[in-house]
């Protein structure tokens, strides 16, 4: 598609070195904010004009939070900084030889380039059913999941076909990591406390929630304690957990597993992510869908290109397969790289990045969570749930978002109600068959 003549990145020339950041996620945003006092022109590129707090996407998908309570405008983060520029564009590639970023509205030169464009859903080469499952990586995905599930129940009250009814009331969640566990727990609470009130003419004993995990345990990135406790919580909530189980196919009606089949019109895919690698880098700089970087986050084989966060593969003795693809790594790498860029601009030597693990956590529902602390301490239940809430509130962008989210959680805790059960826009998939009605 040709670029309209009237559009271009339109970044003014400057005597200051230009740092171009691709991606406004945790890594890119923390990097940009930490460059505030560095003598440089900072340009942030992202296809959205907002930052998304991805750990709470599942709550938007399950009607617990409004989408704008977990998102913040990127431009607001840089108000009052004359050397900061934001452009809402899609980056399609890079040209390290020319020091250019290739975007949907033209090319932009840089002195330093930082790739912080995160990760995308990993479908493990299952191209056939990719258009039929529901990913949960962006706000639009969360809204799609919410609309799709609610539409199914709106249709379920009108169907007289028992087989169609079963498909619409069954939900399959693929992936037993934090997202899969949290989505499953939230759906179980919807089933128990909310949906029966909204749809009293449906028998919710027929609603089945299935959690499919390919390994032998849940929460593989956490301790055995966390995995076992999460499994216990999940099963007590009435969720069918199938471990050592793989999805082989999905045609929009039937999930085919290596152990059998499940009839469902809803498959939420949270089975993993892979790095969002842009075109233009040398093949030797990319491995397993991530960009190889050294201990300073510099892309191997380049002089002035860096990568942070999920897309970066920094192999060390402690992390031979790279750091975990989680928000704390991206945030710490972003802040650390800002210091190193300042050193480079001032002619000083950069410092090695060392990840400080602050622990990991996952929530399964009200008063149910698991927490692994870096000192070896582990928590579960109500106390772990309070820790989880506090940490997530603190990391949200903006006081307004913190206040709205906290208010929603208090209301939900006291009333067992979720106030955003809205079908704002109808979500349609060609494979979804419309049921017959009375």
Image: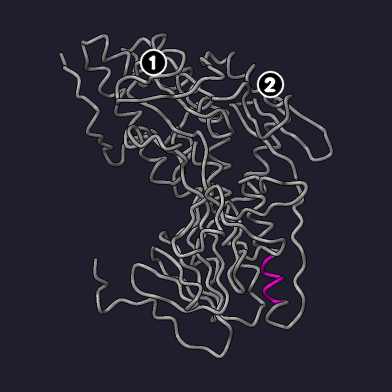
Magenta region includes residue 399: no
Q: In this view, does 297 lie to the left or right of 266?
A: right
Q: Which residue is drawn at 60% across and 58% down?
A: 27
Q: Name the residue under label 1.
A: 262
Q: Nearer the viewer, residue 180 or 318?
A: 318
Q: Name the residue under label 2.
A: 229
Quarter occupied by residue 429 = top left
Q: What main secondary structure does the magenta stretch of the protein show?
A: helix
Which secondary structure, mark 1?
Answer: strand
Mark seen at residue 110: none
Q: Which of 93 and 403 is in front in this view?
A: 93
Residue 3 visible in the current orientation? yes
Looking at the picture, the colour scheme in use is one colour
Quarter of the image that includes the N terminus: bottom left
Relative to 57, does residue 160 appear above or below in the rendering? above
Count of labels shown? 2
Relative to 283, does residue 126 appear above or below in the rendering? above
Q: Residue furthest right?
A: 375
Q: Position of residue 47 (x, y in %)?
A: 41, 60
Relative to 125, does residue 297 appear above or below in the rendering? below
N-term-proximal mark, 1 vs 2: 2
Q: Residue at x 56, y 19 (%)?
A: 243
Q: Is residue 13 left or right of residue 149?
A: right
Magenta-colored span: 337-342
């Amino acid at each position: 598609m040709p670029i309209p003549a009237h559009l271009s990145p339109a970044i003014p020339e400057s005597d200051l070195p230009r740092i171009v950041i691709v991606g406004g996620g945790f890594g890119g945003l923390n990097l940009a904010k930490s460059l505030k006092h560095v003598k440089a022109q900072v340009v942030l590129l992202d296809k959205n004009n907002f930052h998304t707090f991805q750990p709470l996407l599942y709550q938007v998908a399950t009607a617990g939070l409004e989408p704008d309570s977990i998102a913040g405008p990127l431009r607001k983060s840089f108000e009052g900084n004359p050397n900061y520029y934001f452009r809402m564009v899609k980056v399609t590639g890079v040209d390290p030889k020319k020091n250019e970023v290739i975007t949907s509205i033209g090319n932009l030169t840089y002195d330093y380039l930082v790739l912080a464009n995160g990760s995308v859903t990993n479908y493990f080469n299952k191209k056939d059913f990719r258009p039929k499952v529901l990913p949960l990586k962006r706000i639009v995905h969360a809204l799609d999941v919410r609309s799709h599930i609610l539409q199914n129940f709106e249709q379920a009250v009108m169907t007289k076909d028992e087989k169609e009814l079963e498909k619409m009331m069954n939900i399959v969640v693929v992936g037993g990591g934090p997202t899969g566990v949290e989505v499953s727990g939230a759906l179980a609470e919807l089933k128990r406390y909310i949906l029966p009130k909204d749809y009293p003419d449906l028998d919710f004993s027929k609603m089945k929630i299935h959690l499919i995990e390919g390994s032998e345990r849940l929460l593989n990135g956490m301790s055995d304690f966390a995995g076992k406790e999460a499994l216990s919580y999940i099963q007590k909530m009435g969720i069918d957990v199938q471990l050592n189980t793989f999805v082989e196919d999905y045609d929009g009606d039937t999930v085919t597993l290596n152990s059998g089949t499940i009839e469902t019109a809803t498959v939420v895919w949270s089975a993993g992510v892979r790095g969002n690698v842009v075109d233009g880098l040398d093949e030797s700089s990319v491995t397993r869908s991530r960009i190889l970087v050294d201990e300073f986050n510099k892309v191997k084989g380049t002089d002035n290109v860096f990568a942070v966060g999920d897309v970066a593969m920094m192999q060390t003795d402690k992390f031979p397969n790279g750091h975990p693809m989680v928000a704390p790594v991206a945030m710490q790498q972003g802040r650390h790289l800002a210091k190193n860029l300042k050193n480079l601009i001032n002619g000083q030597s950069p410092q090695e990045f060392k990840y400080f693990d602050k622990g990991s956590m996952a929530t399964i529902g009200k008063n149910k969570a698991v927490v692994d602390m870096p000192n070896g301490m582990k928590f579960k239940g109500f106390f772990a749930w309070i820790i989880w809430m506090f940490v997530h509130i603190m990391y949200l962008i903006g006081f307004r978002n913190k206040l709205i989210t906290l208010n929603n959680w208090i209301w939900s805790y006291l009333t067992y109600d979720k106030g955003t059960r809205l079908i704002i826009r109808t979500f349609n998939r060609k494979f979804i068959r419309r049921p017959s009605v009375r």
